[in-house]
Image (tube, rainbow, N blue to C red):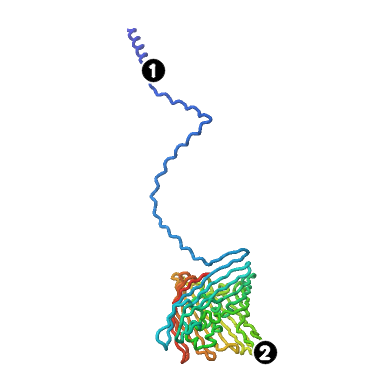
Amino acid sequence: MKSASRRLEIALAVSLTWGGTAAIAHAEPPPAAEPPPAADAPPPAPPEPPPPPPPAPMAIATVAPPPPAAAPAQLKIDLANGTNIRFGVLLQPQYQLLGFNNRDGYSSDFFVHRTRFLVGGTVMGAFDYFLDTELANIGIATSTAGTDAMMMATSNARKTIPGMNLLDVFVTWKSLGDQFKVDVGYMLPPLGHNAVQGAGTLFGLDYNAYSFALHNAAFSQNPAASAANPAAAGVLPGTLSTGRDVGVQLRGLVVGGMLEYRVGAFQGIRTAATADDALSSNMPRLTARLQLNLMDAEPGFFYSGTYLGKKKIVSIGAAFDYQKALTSSSFDDAYHMFALDGFVDLPMGGGVLTIQENFMGWHGGTLLGTLPKWTDTIEAGFTFLDLKISPIVRYDRAWGGTGVATQQRFSGGVAFWPFGHNANVKLFYSRLNVDSPTARGVNQVNAQLQLYFF
């Protein structure tokens, strides 16, 4: 019994020993340790980054187109030592209808009212120069070839192609800045505000009717002829230089720009030679102007008829013009003129209010023939800046003086400023009434395109 029990224990021991050995033999061995890398082996490659997430659906954005490029303000060439040269043009093609009370039909003309080439710039940073050419009223019908381009009183009218003239030629010494400048050459003398404006920056269709009465051949030689056409009184480019004169002028802005002065001596009217006196021996023409600027100043040589919201102008001006003839023995014998003017060009209410008045008193004396005694012009309008449109009205009147009938001119129209003074369109109607039994009333319609840059 004991032997049987002994044999059973030995058998169990052998069985347990065999099962343990078999389990060890079939178990997965532990991973072997990796050998250290060799000294010259390249470093292991970094693990690849996970792929990026898929992009979100792209929203469709509305991109505003770029604004159109602005037109160049000037064509300019810069040279060394503060010297440069600028070029510009002024073109004013027009269509005009003229109707007279005592004639059937209307005079109808396409013509180019002004054609100017402008050149200016600076020399050595101290001298400005300016000159422009003028071809006036190209193609308009005339009563006789070579005569005043606006006269249409007789038959045998023909178109005229004028020659080119120099309109302005002057140099400005500006070393002392805006406080003191000297202009020398052929220029506009300092009369009323309207008479010193640039033709490319006018507010209405043209200058006031009487701003250049002194220089108007029609007024001084034939008042009845000037009454035949609203443009004949004061608006005759090429006729006696349209107000220009040769001389020297001092001008500047003082008191912080609040006061502007202009004082000049000019050729004026020169006397003929006599048995005792040499040619052109009379005194020069003396002219002066003061302007009080209650807001912004106007520092340039030429004023503007409107600044289209770029300036705030409220000004009051006064001017005086005088020249004595050899035979003048008193002030009353000499030619003299005085002017009072006011100018408002003020942004307000999304637009610009523009009002200008020029009152002038004339006396020809022994030096001149017929001149009106008094002239007055008031021009007013409002520019809607969003619409770029200006309705404009104007009233001109001349009265008094020996041999000059009272004239009244009513004008109204609209100006469209798509590119400001650089490119605009104006359409105006005017009616001239003359207090004379022999004078004709005139209806006039003008449509004008302007292209200008300088």
Residue 325 occupies which quadrant of the picture? Answer: bottom right
Q: Quadrant of residue 442?
A: bottom left
- Residue at 37 percent across and 16 percent down: it is 18
Image coordinates of residue 123 in percent, x first then y, are 62, 68
Residue matched to label 2: 276
Residue at the image position 63 percent from the left and 80 percent from the top: 265
Position of 103 compared to 314: left or right? left
Q: Secondary structure at mark 1?
A: helix
Mark 1: few/some/many CA within 10 Å (<14, 14-19, 20+): few
Label 2, secondary structure: give it: loop
Up the image or down, 426 lies above or below 214; here it is above
User: Do the residues bearing badges 2 and 1 touch, measured as CB atoms within 8 Å?
Assistant: no
**Disc ID at residue 21:** 1
Q: Nearer the viewer, residue 451 or 411?
A: 451
- Mark 2, residues whose alpha carbon is within 10 Å: few (<14), some, or many (≥20)? few
Residue type marked 2: Asp
Q: Can residue 15 be spotted in the picture?
A: yes
Mark in the foreground, 2 or 1: 2
At label 1, the amino acid type is: Thr
Where residue 54 sits, quadrant-wise, is top left
Q: Quadrant of the N terminus?
A: top left
Residue 115 position, x and y percent, is: 50, 74
Q: Note whether 436 is above or below 430 in the view shown.
A: below
